[in-house]
Each structure stands twice: as C-alpha cells, then as structure tokens.
Amino acid sequence: MLTTLAVKGYRSLRDLVVPLGPLTVVTGANGTGKSSLYRAFALLAAGASGRLIGSLARAGGLSSVLWAGPETVSGAMRRGEVEVQGTASRRAPVSLAMGFVGDDLGYLIDVGLPAPDVSTMFLRDPQVKREVVFAAPVLRPASTLVQRTARGVRVRQGRGWEDVGWRLAPHACLLDELADPVHFPEVASVRAQVLRWRFYDSFRVDAGAPARQPQVGTRTEVLSSDGADLASAVQTILESAWAEPFAEAVGGAFEGARVSVTESLGRFQLEMRQAGMLRALEASEWSDGTLRFVLLAAALLSPQPPGLLVLNEPESSLHPDALAQLARLIRQATGRTQVVVVTHSRVLVAALDGADVVAHELVKDLGETRIAGQGLIGGAAWDWGRR
Ligand SMILES: Nc1ncnc2c1ncn2[C@@H]1O[C@H](COP(=O)(O)OP(=O)(O)OP(=O)(O)O)[C@@H](O)[C@H]1O
Ligand SMILES: [Mg+2]
C-alpha cells in the first residue's frame, strides 16, 4: 500500500505531501489543485513505462507546468506586509520532483532543464536529474538503496556503494531502464508496483466515444484508461464472481436496468434493457451519465483489480442516486485495492465517509495548494534530499 505521495514544483503544488490510506478522498473548491494532484500522480507513473518526458511535453513542456510563484515565500509575504515577488536570480536549480512511499520502498524523481548549450535546439527538453529508490519510511543517506545522479547510477552493497558503470540518457528513467530483477531487485519491485496503478479521468462519453463502439472481444481483467475495451471488461465481469455486484449497481442506479453483451463475428457490443422499452438499447444510445456509470462500475469491479486505482472527478454527469451506487462500488473496491478519489462532489464525499477513510481538503494559500489543517510543516514525514 502507498502511504505517502509527494509533489514539488508542479503547477500550484509548490511542495505538497499527501498521506494516503486504503481509501483516500481528496476534495476542495475549484482551482485548489485537485486535478493538478491527479496529473502529477499520473506523471509519476508515466516514468515507469518510459513516458514521463513525452507526457511533460504534451502538458506544454516543463517550463509551463512548473510552479509559477516565487522560489521562497517569506512570512512577510504570507502576512501581506510585502508584495509577492521573486529574487533577481534563482538560488536553486529548476526542479519538478515527485515521489511516493509504500510499505517497504520509496521512490523519488527530480526533473530539471539542461545546461545551456549552443549545439542543440532542444534546450527545453526536460532531463531527469536525480532518481532515488530508498527503504521506507523516509529518504535518508542511510536508507538510500539505488541512486541516479548526473554522475551515474550507484547501488548500495552492504556498507558501501557499487557504481553500476553506465550512464542513463538524460531523458530516460531508472525505473524503465534498470528494471532487471536479478541485478536491481528494488528498482524492479518499485517499477512492478507503479505499473499496477490505474488512472481514470473523465472518460469520453460523446457520440464518438470509444466505449460506445463495438470492439473485438478479448478477456479484459482491467479496463483501459480510455474505456475503449468496456464491452470486453463488462463480459469478463459477467463471467466472474463480480457479476452480481455489477448487476446490483447498474440496477440500483438506473431503475432495474440490466447490462449485457452481445457478440457478432468476434465483436462485442453492449446493450441495456430497461423497464418500458420494447428493445434493448445499444451503448451508442445510452445517456452520457449511464455510459460513465457503467465505465466506472467496470473499473471498480475488475476481477483482478490493479494495485492502486485513482479516479479524477468521477461524479461528473451523475445523478445523486447513481452517486450513492458509485460510493458503494468504491467501498467494495477498497479492501481489494487501494483507492484514491479526487472529487468536488459533497454528496460523494459524505457517502464515502467512514473510519478507514483518509480525507483531505485542498485549499489555496497565496497561490499554493495546501491540505487544510496540515500547517506549514506538513502532515507526513518526507525529505526531498538534494541533487
Ligand atoms: N504553473 C503554475 N504555477 C502555479 N499555479 C498554477 C500553475 N498552473 C496552474 N496553476 C493554478 O493551479 C490551480 C489548480 O488547478 P486544478 O486544475 O488542479 O484545480 P482543481 O482543484 O482541479 O479545480 P476544478 O475543481 O475547477 O477542477 C489553478 O487555480 C491555476 O491557477
Ligand atoms: Mg479539476
């Protein structure tokens, strides 16, 4: 289980340490940084499959996602005694850093910009400056197990260090490149963990949405992030022990409606039977909210759930009845997998409340995202170390 997620320098997340539980609910007003937290989390995961730098480029480049406030915020700025302003020159290098701690291991990645160089135009290409795999709970020199810096990669061997002997390309991630479980068991373990995270953000439900189209049917234990394999994922659930909870959830949310899958020439198509209808309605005819609910139900009732499921604003276009069913599904999934829900629906937050829930409310403080009630010191132990 993940116990802490930390982000530094990403949009309004100047330095945020987020304690996580079996079910974590993150809420907050518009613009407090909920989606930024979700995106930073997804970016961290992208590194394990070699997509970090590409994902950053698609988000507008490193310079655009970096914290746009001053490097340090003084007490006088906070009290409003002086204007918020930056220093003439930066003291610390440009840095976007993210990391997490699980039960046994922690991981941190620190991304920056290349040194000025007249021979290349790629001066905005982010570079990985530092990556560390450490023993939980906190990064310390003594808990560091594998360290990648500009000088190379070194691995702890008893009381000393062994240099791995090769340098990684500046855009490559340790997690992706050194995941050989024989030589780098800790790196492989962190990578395997990260690859089992799933992120679901505002599924497309428009008329051309992939989830509305018939698809080649293949056994699908985990719904893809775009929901394109929904019919396969639903049929996999209907042939598993989760068929009944799935039927109950859909029936509960939509007045006894029943979802099934038809097959023609290997292509799977979803249909829904509802009271009062003479024929079943195909997925192309479902309402946006119906499709979104079925997508979420398929994600949450996966027969082989991912290690961690992160949902961003799952409440959009759902009626309170469907929200109550969604909350039940999320509670059922918790226990089988760790769940993080980012939401601004008070109804959903209230329905998810319980003893095992870690709830965070994000607030803005001088443009910076903070967790309400956490104070300036932060709520969980975390150390960024240094380059
Ligand atoms: N580079 C940046 N530096 C600092 N703050 C930024 C930067 N880019 C965006 N922001 C701010 O980050 C805030 C957080 O946006 P985000 O999309 O995460 O909010 P949200 O909590 O998901 O809001 P909503 O409920 O409206 O979806 C915005 O208010 C925006 O002004
Ligand atoms: Mg948002």
Image (cartoon, rainbow, N blue to C red):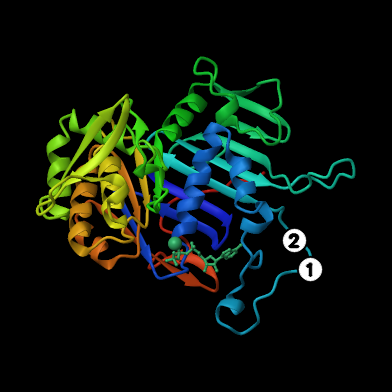
Residue at 18%, 53% (x, y): give it.
325
Q: Quadrant of the C terminus?
A: top right
- When asked about the image quadrant of residue 29, the answer is bottom left
Residue positioned 35% across, 65% down in the render? 344
Q: Residues within 10 Å of mark 1 (few under 14, many from 20)?
A: few
Q: Quadrant of residue 54?
A: top right
Q: Is residue 137 visible?
A: no
Residue 299 drawn above or below residue 60: above
Type of residue at label 2? Answer: Arg
Between 242 and 384, the residue placed more toward the observer is 242
Label 2 element class: loop
Q: Residue 40 at what x, y percent from top left?
A: 51, 50
* Closer to the camera in the image, 383 or 268: 268
Query: Residue 62: in sight, yes or no?
Result: yes
How far separated are the C-alphas under marks 2 and 1? 7 Å
Q: Is 292 placed left or right of 374 in the picture?
A: left
What residue did someone put label 2 on? 90
List x then y, in percent, for residue 26.
36, 59
Residue at disc 1, secondary structure:
loop
Instruction: Find disc 1 in the rendering and name its residue.
Output: 88
Split into quadrants, the picture shows ligand 2 in the one at bottom left
- Residue that appears at 28% across and 56% down: 287
Q: Nearer the viewer, residue 345 or 127?
A: 345
Q: Is residue 168 above or below residue 125?
A: above
Which image quarter holds the N terminus?
A: top left
Front residue of 129 and 213: 213
Query: Number of numbered discs present?
Result: 2
Rendering coords of residue 273 (x, y %): 15, 46
Name the amino acid, label 1.
Ala
The residue lying at 17 percent from left, 54 percent from top is 253
